[in-house]
Amino acid sequence: MPKGYWVSSYRTIPDPEELATYNKLAGQAVRIAGGRTLARGGRTAAYDAGIAGRTVLVEFDSFEQAVAARESDAYQEALAALSDGIERDFRIIEGID
């Protein structure tokens, strides 16, 4: 069964403290759902305009598990910690089996 991945690239981060609160809650939600954070921030070589240096990659055992984690109450609580000012591209993708 192919794995599922959360891929999130941030365009703007106007409030780093708000992001820190989200990260704490989201990290807990990911762990509860069985996800593993493979990359978060760190060095990035960006080749397309409009994407900030922060990219996050989270792996789940299946695409369905990744979607369920995104829809979970724990992750919804994390999302509530983010304001409308944060711009990011968040996708859930299916891996190659």
Image (cartoon, grey):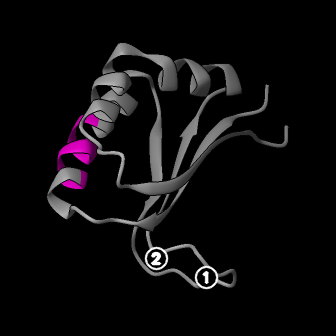
Residue under label 1: 46
Decide: marks 2, 1 in contact (CB < 8 A)? yes
Would you place residue 84 above or below residue 35 in this image? Answer: below
Which residue is located at x 43 percent, y 16 percent? 72
64 displayed left or right of 95: left
Dot 2 surroundings within 10 Å: few (below 14), some, or many (20 or more)?
Answer: some
Where does residue 93 sit, x and y in percent of width and height? Answer: 72, 40
Would you place residue 26 above or below residue 76 in this image? Answer: below
Which residue is located at x 58 percent, y 28 percent? 66
Q: Identify the magenta region.
A: 19-25
Residue 22 on the magenta span = yes
Question: In which quarter of the view is residue 86 placed?
Answer: bottom left
Would you place residue 68 above or below residue 16 in this image? Answer: above
Q: Amino acid at mark 1?
A: Ala
Which residue is located at x 28 percent, y 24 percent? 77
Name the element at disc 1.
Answer: loop
Label located before the other in sequence (2 or 1): 1
Question: In the depicted view, which residue is nearer to us: 36 or 74?
Answer: 74
Question: In the depicted view, which residue is nearer to us: 32 or 23?
Answer: 23
Q: CA distance from mark 2 to mark 1?
A: 7 Å
Question: In which quarter of the view is residue 97 placed?
Answer: top right
Where does residue 50 sit, x and y in percent of width and height? Answer: 59, 75
Residue under label 2: 53
Which residue is located at x 25 percent, y 53 percent? 19
The quarter of the rendered structure image containing the N terminus is top right
40 displayed left or right of 89: left
Disc number placed over residue 90 in the picture, else none: none
Question: In the depicted view, which residue is nearer to us: 4 or 52?
Answer: 52
Where does residue 18 sit, x and y in percent of width and height? Answer: 19, 51
Which secondary structure class fits the magenta region best? helix
47 displayed left or right of 17: right
Question: In the depicted view, which residue is nearer to us: 87 or 28?
Answer: 87
